Amino acid sequence: MKSLLMATAAATLLASAAMAEVKVGMITTLSGGGAGLGIDVRDGFMLAVKQSGRDDIEVVIEDDQRKPDIAVQLADKMIQSEKVDVLTGIIWSNLAMAVVPSVTAQGKFYLSPNAGPSALAGKGCHPNYFNVAWQNDNLHEAAGAYANTADFGKSFILAPNYPAGKDALTGYKRFFEGDISGEIYTQLGQTDYAAEIAQIRASDADSVFFFLPGGMGISFLKQYADSGVDLPVVGPAFSFDQGILQAVGDAALGVVNTSQWNKDIDNATNAAFVASFEAEYGRLPSLYASQGFDTANLLISAIGAADISDADAFREALRAANFDSTRGAFAFGPNHHPVQTIYAREVVKEGDVFTNKLLGTALENHSDAYAADCKM
């Protein structure tokens, strides 16, 4: 009997070892003005975990309140007390800059489902940092490329004064071949744009490019529509995403924006994702939800290929990106940022729902401008 108990215990230990748990720390924005973005990343991520059927993944979720100091405290707690293996979830680039270098310095992996600051794509790259969304400049570069095809010659450009805002205007100017009639950095979280719209009105611009994510974009678009300024607007998906559009309403109709994802990208993974997300949560998925979903599936693919305790093998499994993305073709460049196609989309109304439809390709198999500075 004793030998039978010992054998049973040994078998249990072996089974436990074979199913070694991977603990994920998700720090994202779940309250305040940017909550919708974090909620969508969380929901997309958790949907993928649920669909995987794996019981060896534990996800610890915390709200960073869009505050860098809170995010840093949470990351330290997750690493030191919760003993997480992987971190993810951050939406805002200033928070990513506060958290990611510390996380990777402690030997943990960070998978970004959103923020992609240039400082982490170039000289500040790290073998344990992977961005599953885009490098910050990318969608704005695509907007600049689209503006050329629309024959815009003089653009007035504006974005918030934080890392992603600076990357946005840099990206647009990198590809836009016309002149810049005005350039403004607004306050992060600003809601009144009367002064900026007055400057646009007084300029010689023939178009407006703006990057104002979350509630900032809602406020700007409504005020711009009411202002009587009728210059065409172009921007990245962040200001025309699924959650934002319902709040903006008719003011967004017809606006062209750029994105690496849309609900009508024609592949089986995306069709299944859109249907299952709507069934699970009762709403259409957003860009952020698709990024959370893809991030989880990247992680799941790596868990299936390598033991996370073997950092080198696990890193290679992540780098292989052996998963079916909602975007279709997906690969990492040498700095662990995506190489992917970015599309132009138009805001339309389907029944009572404001959404986007694909117009065409803005940039194909596009990487980022900072990879050459990354030495790994």
Image (cartoon, grey):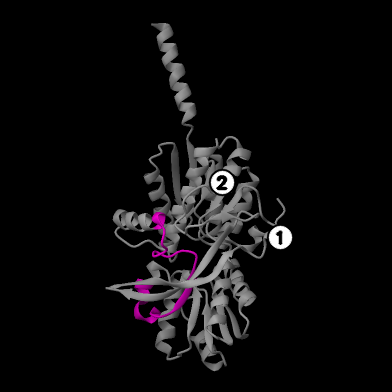
Residue that numbered label 1 is attached to: 372
Kindly identify the residue that appears in the image at 63 percent across and 73 percent down.
170
Q: Is residue 149 above or below residue 343?
A: below
Place of residue 38 in the rendered image (x, y in percent of width and height, measured from the top left) = 44, 58
Label 2 CA crowd tier, 10 Å (few <14, some 14–19, many 20+): many
Observer-nearest residue: 252 or 35?
252
Which dot marks residue 318?
A: 2
Label 1 is placed on what type of residue? Answer: Ala
Spot occupied by residue 188 in the image (x, y as percentages of width and height): 53, 71
Foreground residue, 230 or 371?
371
Residue type at the position of mark 2? Leu
Residue 315 place in picture, x, y as percent: 60, 43
Which residue in the rendered view is the most extreme toward the left? 351
Q: Is residue 301 above or below residue 17?
A: below
Mark 1: few/some/many CA within 10 Å (<14, 14-19, 20+): few
In this rendering, position of residue 149 left or right of residue 4: right
Q: Is residue 197 visible?
A: yes
Tell me where the magenta segment starts and ends, as one range.
245-270
Residue found 62% across the figure and 85% down from its top: 178
- Say which quarter of the image contains residue 355: bottom left
Label 2 sits on a secondary structure element that is helix
Residue beneath the point at 48% across and 82% down: 233
Q: Residue at x 55, y 86 (%)?
A: 151
Element type where label 1 sits in the image: helix
Q: Dividing the picture into quarters, in which one does residue 34 lie?
A: bottom left
Q: Quadrant of the N terminus?
A: top left
Q: Earlier in the sequence, mark 1 or mark 2?
A: 2
